[in-house]
Image (tube, rainbow, N blue to C red):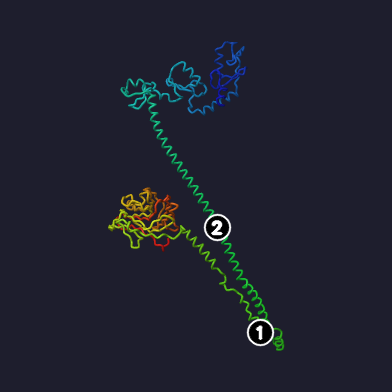
Amino acid sequence: MAAIDLRAELRCSICMNIYTDPVTLTCGHNFCRVCITRTWDHQTESEYTCPECMQRFKKRPELKRNLTLCNIAEAFLHTHLERDNTGIFCTYCDFPVPAARSCVQCEISMCDNHLRKHDRSVEHTLVPPSTSLSERKCSIHKKILEYFCRDDAGCICATCCLTGDHIGHSLESLIEASDKKKEKLRLVLEKLSSKKVEIDKRVHGLQEHKRQLHEKAAGVTERVIDFFVNIRRQLEVLETGILGEIYRQEEQVLRPVVDLIQRLEIKNDELSRKMRHIEELCNMTDPLNVLQERESGTEDFCNTEMGGKEDRGRPDAQVHDISDLHVGPISETLRTLSDIITGLKKGIYMQEPTDILLDVNTAANNIRIAKDLKTVSWSLERKNYPNPSHRFQFNQILSIHSFSSGRHYWEVETSESGDWRVGVCYPSIDRKEHASIIGNNNKSWCLHRCNNLISLAQGSNSNQYSVIHDGKYVHLPHNISSNSFRIYLDYENGQLCFHELCDPIRHLHTFTTTFTEPLHAVFYVWDKMCGNGSWVRVRSLDKSP
């Protein structure tokens, strides 16, 4: 609104455009220098008047440039031109003035002032400001394009309709053709809009999922930090208590030892003094002196040496044995902490592994089961097992027991050749069709190793590992070198985790869902090389990773 008011103040009342080189008359009104000069050129001397207030001047006034107004007008015009997206200016104006319309016939652009004059003079086709006016004319006849040829899908002029290659073609006006195309574009726009809405919903859903994951991760992180802060605090208290107990026991056991050492050192000094005295007696040559000295303390010494009263009261009787330092409870505490840390370093600190036994009644006829019901392998020879309705048709077998609650894990060893899959499935899984293979349906989840024949022939690493559910493969980027794996099931939390039993244990993938049926462990084996090298073995409970 302020820009519109400013434009009105900066508009010359003669040309109705923004001031160009504005000058001020003595009456105070402003005009473009060119506009007032042309106006006065048509007036006689002594009849010069101001177009605004009609004030008369006896002689032609001297025009003085209004520098301040000139700067304001140029700044306003410059700002307006920057905001003008077309960048097309009036052909007639001496100063760059944005064009209002363009004339196709004349191939010129005009501002509002010149457009009014052009409208009164001729009836031409006016279009929004454009620099490509020649494109609106026929390239052959140089006439305005008025029709659309549906046969050639091009715009043509009236002459093209009567002569040339368009005679007899299906024609329609540009407006009709444009309306039809707009209708088609609206239909396309509706489809694109619906797709955009769908994508927006998906993006919003993924963003919400991302936000929830961040919140969950932040919550778990906070709990873990608090947990370990508490553990460190308790460990510090435990450390202080253990060290204090060791110091207390040390002080208790060492106190009599220190006392005894001091007493023995005193006695040792006394003995040394008496020994020096005896040596002096032994070196005397005067018998009388030797005999007289016996009465001055030598007798006490002899009594002491011969087992007197002081010697019989042994001062070391109060000394504790080194076994009196009770380190047993302390060592047991340290051993317990060491076992916990060792378990954590190995990967998963949880309950004992679950014992898995294979259900022979579900085995396909081309797999072999060991007597201990823990090893399954692929066989070229069909076994012709009895054919109950729940036996698999393709290369796999279920566990005897199922899991409908709790946390469980079991460990498997696998062959270095052939194809195998290990995982879990619902008992309602199909048993006959090819889609019954674990991972190929929405009732099973598995870790898969595929032996790629092409890669094998080329001499490259042919082992490809992936996890599969509902036919969707997720290839694992890890360089898996171990043939031992751990499957961890948390039924209530809907998690199935696969780990590689290396040092340290490495997490491979976790499926997260809501389990709706009991789950059986399931094993699939097959050898593309038509050998007998594909097998899977459930680790015994007495084996450790």
Pointer 2: residues within 10 angstroms few (<14), some, or many (20+)?
few
State whether residue 190 is above or below residue 246: above
State whether residue 161 is above or below residue 543: above
> Residue 526 at x, y = what percent?
32, 55
Q: Is residue 475 left or right of residue 310?
A: left
Quick one: SS at disc 1?
helix
Q: Quadrant of residue 124?
A: top left
> Residue 278 at x, y = what percent?
67, 83
The residue pinned by badge 2 equals 232
Q: Amino acid at mark 2?
A: Arg
The front one of 247 and 145 is 247
State whether residue 251 is above or below residue 212: below
> Residue 493 at x, y = what percent?
45, 52
The front one of 418 and 220 is 220
The residue pinned by badge 1 equals 303
Q: Amino acid at mark 1?
A: Asn
> Residue 328 at x, y = what percent?
54, 68
Q: Is residue 135 left or right of residue 300?
A: left
Q: Is residue 146 left or right of residue 117?
A: left
Q: Nearer the viewer, mark 2 or mark 1?
A: 2
